[in-house]
Structure formats: C-alpha cells, structure tokens
Amino acid sequence: MLKALVLDYGGVLTDPGEDNAQEPPLLTALRKAKHAGLKTALLSNADGWWQPPTTYQGLFDATVISGEVGLAKPQREIYLLTAHQLALEPAECVFVDDLAINVHGAKAAGMVGVHHRSTESTLEELEILLAVALRD
C-alpha cells in the first residue's frame, strides 16, 4: 500500500498545468494528499543554497536537497534516504519526476515511479495509485 507522495520541484511542483491554474496543480494535489493522511516529501537535485518557497512550509514531512545530502538523483541512495526520512519502506512511496532517468532510479530503489509529462496524466495516474482525489 502506498503511504507517501514524493515530488520533484522544478518541472513537477512548478508546472502551471494545461489550464494555467492559480496554484500549480501538483501543489494542490500535494495539499490534498497530505490532508488525506499521506506522508509527503520534496526530493530535488538543487544545490545546498536552495530552499523551497516559504509558502511550502509545513507541506513536507521530509525535504531532501542534493546539495545538502551529497547525493543526487538518480543515485539509489537518495531515494532510500528519502524513504528513511519518511519512516517508510521505498515500496510505500510514489515518486514523480519530469526526467525519465530519475523515475528509473526511483524504481530501481524500490519506489513506484511516475514520469511527469503533463499535469493531467500525472494526476490521473496518482489518483489511481493513491486512491485519493487530488484535483478540485
């Protein structure tokens, strides 16, 4: 059973979507997933100086930034670290990234991977996997 939603920042959380919604659709989905009781994490290959916007505070149970931990996607260890910070097994986490190589890395580490190509297709897949309504 999937218990956590792990998202990349650039290209996923920042994607304005096909409708150019007021809030990026995957940010809305993240809020709904958290409200439904799922754990949430941000996994980014950003450098150590980068921090998520302050409007994201409280949305993540774990934040893993490559520049801080000395690992980068698609290294297996960064996915294992993220699952560990969530106190879950990798198989209990679904990871979303816009780069296929990073999704393959997550799958190799035991996570369920979703390749983000459009907000609509990603949300459809996540709603099936997580059994949670993630759209308004």
Image: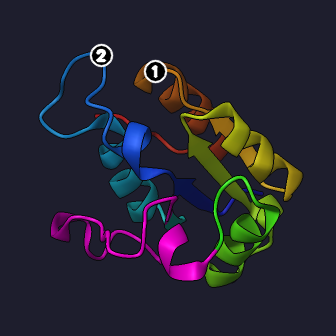
Q: Secondary structure at mark 1?
A: loop
Magenta stretch encompasses residue 66:
yes
Q: Is residue 100 visible?
A: yes
State left or right for residue 65 relative to residue 100: left
Residue 62 in the image: state x and y as whole percent.
50, 77
Q: Quadrant of residue 58?
A: bottom left
Frontmost residue, 64 versus 113: 64
Across the whole image, how many numbered discs are drawn on residues?
A: 2
- The disc labelled 1 sits on which kind of residue? Ser
Read off the residue under disc 1: 118
Q: Residue at x 50, y 65 (%)?
A: 40
Q: Earlier in the sequence, mark 1 or mark 2?
A: 2
Badge 2 density bin: few <14, some 14–19, many ≥20, Cα 10 Å: few
Read off the residue under disc 2: 18
State left or right for residue 89 relative to residue 85: right
Asked which colour scheme the image uses, the reply is: rainbow
Assign the C terminus to one quadrant of the image.
top left
Residue farthest to the top? 18
Q: Which residues are magenta?
A: 42-70
Q: Quadrant of residue 11?
A: top left
Residue 129 in the image: state x and y as whole percent.
67, 40
Q: Residue at x 70, y 77 (%)?
A: 81
Q: Is residue 9 above or below residue 52?
A: above
Magenta stretch encompasses residue 50:
yes
Q: Is residue 97 above or below residue 83?
A: above
Q: Is residue 64 visible?
A: no
Q: Residue at x 54, y 34 (%)?
A: 98
Tag 1–tag 2 contact (CB < 8 Å) = yes
Q: CA distance from mark 1 to mark 2?
A: 8 Å
Q: Which mark is residue 96?
A: none
Residue 24 in the image: state x and y as whole percent.
26, 38
Residue 4 in the image: state x and y as whole percent.
61, 62
